[in-house]
């Protein structure tokens, strides 16, 4: 209760900070340096919204006792960061969507905090509490999306990008790139936690992939051309949408009744080829476009079996989706011109994208790991289960019990043995030449007598 009271006092004090008004600024002067207060604001808010709040959200989903302390620290930290953002010197910024969004986020944060305090009081359990939970849960799960959006708009504001005629291109790049990263996060969740869910519903991963591709293709087809004469970029982007909904329709048909499909992999590869062959104005743009925009290893998921143990190569497709998203976000005309003016070559630029993609994928995989190993899920996990993404290596040396014996605990191949204790040959879920043409992780062959599935 005392902690909640302190948060409430900070909430009452914070509007005074928002009362600070920036001078009327029309254009951002890049010659004026950004002072240390603004850099501190950026660092604090990035840490809170990209790391701390998502960790708190996951701890809440797993019913961990650390959920409330972590979120309380996050609320205090983001209030301090917002105060710094309104009381800085150095470079001044014009009124932008970032500033408007900050005020909206403040009230969202207050509503979420109030709901959390109410739930901690454990009162009106049969009347008001169920309704508060319906608000608190979904709103908390939206925090990573809110934070990601605000961070991107903060970077755009700091650099003075996406103003005037550049808005549409920024929206196209940021929305598509963010969608790639979001779907990579969904793939990681499905990879580690969604196998049983898919099996219960008789649905394959490719059905979900194809459905998303279909919907996104329809949206992309009718939103790329914003009026005026058609340019080659408009035609390419529109045809990319046609490619997605046409291929998505085929993927949905081939993936019916729990079947696997090659279509999502081929669509992503074709999309990557289209992006890399896209005509660019600058040499750095043309070179940077050759960064792996097509996660060819998406094919590996066609032979991947959703199971409690995840093979390490299965992380490659979602990681490359993250890399593709980062590359797309960082490839607007203004960003390319800015890098070219600073003398940054395509190799340096690509290495920056690689590094950022590793950090983003680290956060995604850590959050999934944290959910599986915290709160009520920590009590469910067995002591001997291998970590998702690692499995035991089958070696010749075996112990008296017939199981592998030696320093092969965390290697790249799947462990032998099944949940019921029966031994596997290692070929039961692999693609066989002259036998199964795909992985039967839905166990359909048991119902059909092992017939070939096309």
Image: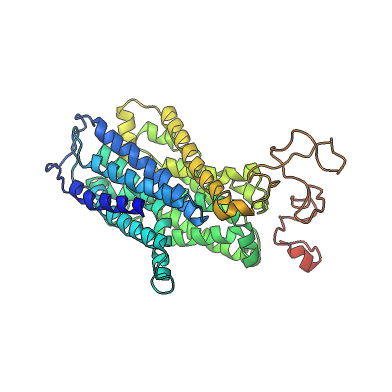
> x, y percentage for residue 117?
37, 58
**Residue 109 in picture, x, y percent from top left:** 32, 54
Say whether residue 337 is left or right of residue 178. Answer: left
Q: How is the image coloured?
A: rainbow
Quadrant of the rendered image containing residue 342: top left
Image height check: is 76 above or below 138? above
Image quarter in which the C terminus is found = bottom right
Q: Quadrant of residue 124?
A: bottom left
Report the side of 454 relative to 69 (left or right). right
Please, which residue is most extreme toward the right here? Answer: 400
On screen, residue 443 above or below 431: below
Q: Place residue 313 in its image quadrant.
A: top right
Name of the residue lying farthest toward the left: 24
> Residue 57 vs residue 41: left or right?
right
One can see residue 202 in this view = no
Kindly identify the residue that appears in the image at 29 percent across and 34 percent down: 39
Q: Position of residue 168 (x, y in %)?
A: 30, 50
Q: Which residue is drawn at 32% across and 46% down?
A: 76
Residue 166 locus on image (x, y percent): 27, 46
Q: Which of 111 and 268 is in front in this view?
A: 111
| Number of callouts | 0
Q: Measured along the vertical axis of the image, is residue 147 above or below residue 346?
A: below
Residue 113 seen in the current view: yes
The residue closer to the viewer here, 438 or 179, is: 179
Residue at the (62%, 45%) spot, across then down: 314
Quadrant containing the N terminus is: bottom left
Question: Which is nearer the eye, 451 or 447?
Answer: 447
Query: Furthest-top residue in view?
Result: 343
């Amino acid at each position: 209760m005392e902690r909640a009271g302190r948060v409430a006092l900070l909430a009452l004090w914070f509007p005074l900070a928002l009362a600070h008004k920036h001078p009327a600024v029309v254009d951002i002067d890049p010659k004026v340096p950004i002072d240390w207060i603004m850099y501190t604001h950026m660092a604090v808010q990035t840490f809170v919204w990209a790391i701390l709040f998502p960790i708190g959200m996951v701890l809440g989903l797993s019913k961990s006792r650390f959920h409330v302390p972590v979120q309380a620290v996050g609320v205090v930290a983001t209030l301090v960061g917002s105060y710094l953002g309104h009381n800085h010197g150095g470079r001044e910024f014009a009124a932008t969507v970032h500033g408007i969004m900050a005020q909206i986020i403040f009230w969202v944060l207050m509503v979420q905090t109030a709901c959390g305090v109410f739930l901690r009081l454990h009162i009106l359990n049969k009347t008001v509490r169920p309704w508060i939970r319906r608000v608190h849960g979904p709103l908390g799960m939206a925090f990573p999306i809110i934070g990601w959006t605000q961070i991107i708009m903060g970077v755009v504001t700091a650099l003075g990008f996406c103003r005037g005629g550049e808005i549409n291109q920024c929206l196209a790049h940021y929305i598509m790139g963010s969608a790639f990263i979001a779907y990579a996060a969904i793939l990681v969740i499905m990879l580690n936690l969604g196998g049983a869910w898919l099996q219960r519903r008789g649905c394959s991963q490719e059905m979900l992939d194809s459905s998303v591709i279909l919907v996104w293709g329809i949206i992309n087809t009718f939103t790329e051309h914003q009026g005026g004469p058609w340019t080659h970029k408009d035609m390419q982007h529109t045809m990319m949408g046609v490619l997605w909904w046409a291929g998505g329709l085929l993927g949905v048909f081939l993936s019916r009744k729990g079947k696997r499909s090659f279509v999502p992999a081929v669509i992503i590869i074709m999309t990557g080829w289209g992006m890399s062959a896209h005509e660019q104005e600058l040499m750095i743009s043309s070179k940077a476009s050759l960064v792996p925009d097509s996660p060819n290893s998406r094919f590996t998921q066609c032979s991947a079996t959703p199971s409690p143990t995840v093979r390490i190569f299965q992380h490659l497709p979602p990681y490359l989706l993250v890399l593709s998203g980062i590359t797309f976000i960082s490839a607007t005309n203004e960003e390319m011109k800015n890098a070219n003016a600073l003398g940054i070559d395509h190799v340096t630029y690509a290495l920056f994208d690689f590094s950022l993609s590793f950090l983003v994928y680290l956060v995604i995989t850590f959050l999934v790991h944290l959910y599986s190993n915290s709160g009520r899920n920590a009590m469910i996990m067995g002591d001997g289960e291998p970590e998702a993404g690692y499995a035991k290596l089958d070696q010749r040396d075996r112990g008296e019990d017939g199981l592998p014996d030696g320093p092969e605990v965390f290697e790249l191949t799947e462990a032998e043995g099944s949940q019921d204790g029966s031994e596997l040959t290692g070929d039961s879920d692999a693609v066989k030449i002259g036998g199964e043409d795909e992985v039967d992780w839905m166990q359909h062959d048991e119902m059909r007598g092992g017939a070939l599935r096309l």
